[in-house]
């Protein structure tokens, strides 16, 4: 086995350099009253970056992150960084939690205890999970791919190897949103003999061949969103290195690019900090800034565009549960999902958006427990 312990530890000089770069930021002008219409609200990003330089305590959060056992395992030539948290319950289901962009393993921080020790949160100890939470290759503090080809299919294969060969789990569940939802679905399709069930809060599905009038409304809304809100994906999917050179040099530029997505995709209302505190936003950003993984993480878009098998595969017959959060920009109707998945559980949530594990950890954890409870009982 190639597994060895790993704790997140950012050198002091990296933190000093970060503060110096923030202090030297050359800020552009923004049109009066522009708000978030043109992209990031520069007044808010300046406020956030001032706190990043002068108030944010990385060492405090680094200590919190290292509460959970961290490891590295070399799989397919890349060191995968992951948390592995066990419940001590012999009936616990091994569960792989997969994040997306612009997230990190930190997305799952607030649901870990709810899943590992459900009895402490109003559920039964029999609902426990043993969690494996890996960083996507090239993301965060893990290794960076040094060759082309790390699309969805290869990531799914690497995570399956991590769960089976490295950790010794014969059967396991998967859960994810954003890229994590896409990768989890691919794993359910490619490894049905190992995947017990897939719980998703993001689905990549197409409308039915003969859409109804209601379907056409969903299609129109989807197309409008694609036209107005997905320039980031086209850039990262075609010329990522032209963009990430600037973001690797400017923490303020990185903050603007990432935080705008939290504002646009999250259930934030009129104030982003009603949902995401500055400390939450900055801790997530540190997974990109501190290990200089901005470029290697963005390339997932480039590689995925060149991996059609990551999106096109036979209908998934593994039992699938879906949590639909109302502010999820890519939400789809159930009958669309049933074309491609064996849907046995479907929950329409009362609130929450794209970053469900951060926004609504209690709701998401409860739904994960409810879905897998059905599979535990047969």
Image (cartoon, rainbow, N blue to C red):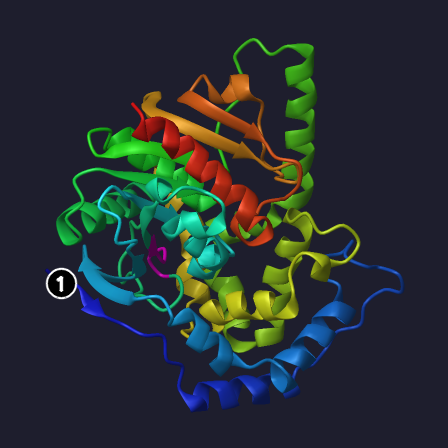
Which of the 4 image quadrants contains residue 175? top left
In the rendered image, residue 134 lying in the magenta stretch gets the answer yes
Q: Which residue is mark 1?
A: 2
Q: Give above or below for 289 relative to 313.
A: below
**On the picture, is 142 further left or further right than 26?**
left
Q: Quadrant of the C terminus?
A: top left
- Residue 290 visible somewhere in the drawing: no
Q: Residue furthest right?
A: 32
Which of the 4 image quadrants contains residue 64? bottom left
**On the picture, is 350 further left or further right than 61?**
right
In the rendered image, residue 367 lying in the magenta stretch gets the answer no
Q: Position of residue 111 (x, y in %)?
A: 47, 53
Q: Position of residue 67 (x, y in %)?
A: 38, 70
Q: Give above or below for 258 relative to 10.
A: above
Frontmost residue, 166 versus 78:
166
**On the picture, is 231 further left or further right than 310?**
right
Frontmost residue, 116 versus 340:
116
Residue at 30% x, 36% y: name it: 187
Q: Residue furthest left?
A: 1
Residue at 57% x, 27% y: name it: 332
Q: Position of residue 323 (x, y in %)?
A: 52, 34
Q: Which residues are magenta?
A: 133-138
Residue at 62% x, 79% y: name it: 52
Badge 1 density bin: few <14, some 14–19, many ≥20, Cα 10 Å? few
Please, what secondary structure does the residue beneath circle 1 have? loop
- Residue 205 visible somewhere in the drawing: yes
Query: Which SS type dominates the magenta stretch?
Result: loop
Residue at 58% x, 22% y: name it: 333
Q: Give above or below for 225 relative to 250.
A: above
Q: Quadrant of the N terminus?
A: bottom left
Q: Position of residue 44 (x, y in %)?
A: 75, 68
């Amino acid at each position: 086995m190639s597994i060895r312990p790993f704790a997140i530890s950012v050198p002091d000089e990296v933190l000093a350099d970060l503060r110096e770069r923030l202090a030297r930021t050359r800020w552009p002008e923004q049109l009066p009253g522009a708000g978030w219409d043109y992209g990031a609200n520069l007044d808010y990003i300046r406020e956030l970056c001032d706190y990043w330089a002068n108030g944010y305590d990385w060492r405090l959060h680094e200590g919190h992150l290292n509460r959970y056992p961290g490891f590295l395992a070399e799989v397919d030539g890349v060191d995968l960084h992951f948390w592995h948290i066990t419940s001590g319950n012999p009936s616990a289901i091994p569960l792989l939690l997969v994040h997306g962009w612009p997230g990190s393993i930190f997305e799952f921080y607030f649901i870990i205890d709810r899943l590992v020790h459900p009895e402490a949160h109003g559920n039964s100890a029999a609902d426990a999970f043993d969690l494996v939470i890996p960083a996507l290759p090239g993301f965060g503090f893990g290794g960076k791919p040094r060759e082309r080809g790390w699309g969805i299919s290869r990531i799914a294969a690497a995570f399956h190897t991590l769960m089976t060969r490295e950790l010794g789990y014969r059967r396991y569940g998967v859960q994810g949103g954003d890229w994590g939802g896409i990768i989890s679905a691919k794993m359910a399709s490619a490894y049905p003999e190992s995947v017990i069930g897939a719980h998703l809060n993001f689905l990549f599905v197409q409308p039915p061949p003969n859409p109804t009038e209601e379907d056409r409304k969903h299609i129109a809304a989807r197309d409008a969103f694609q036209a107005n809100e997905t320039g980031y994906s086209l850039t990262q999917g075609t010329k990522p290195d032209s963009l990430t050179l600037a973001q690797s040099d400017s923490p303020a530029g990185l903050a603007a690019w990432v935080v705008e997505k939290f504002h646009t995709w999250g259930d934030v209302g009129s104030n982003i900090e009603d949902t995401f505190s500055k400390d939450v936003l900055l801790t997530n950003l540190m997974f990109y800034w501190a290990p200089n993984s901005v470029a290697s993480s963005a390339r997932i878009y480039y590689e995925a565009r060149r991996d059609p098998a990551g999106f096109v595969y036979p209908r998934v017959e593994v039992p699938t549960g879906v949590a639909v959060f109302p502010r999820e920009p890519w939400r789809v109707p159930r009958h669309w999902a049933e074309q491609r998945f064996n849907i046995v559980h479907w929950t329409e949530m009362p609130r929450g958006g794209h970053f469900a594990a951060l926004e609504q950890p209690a709701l998401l954890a409860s739904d994960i427990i409810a879905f897998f409870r059905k599979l535990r009982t047969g």
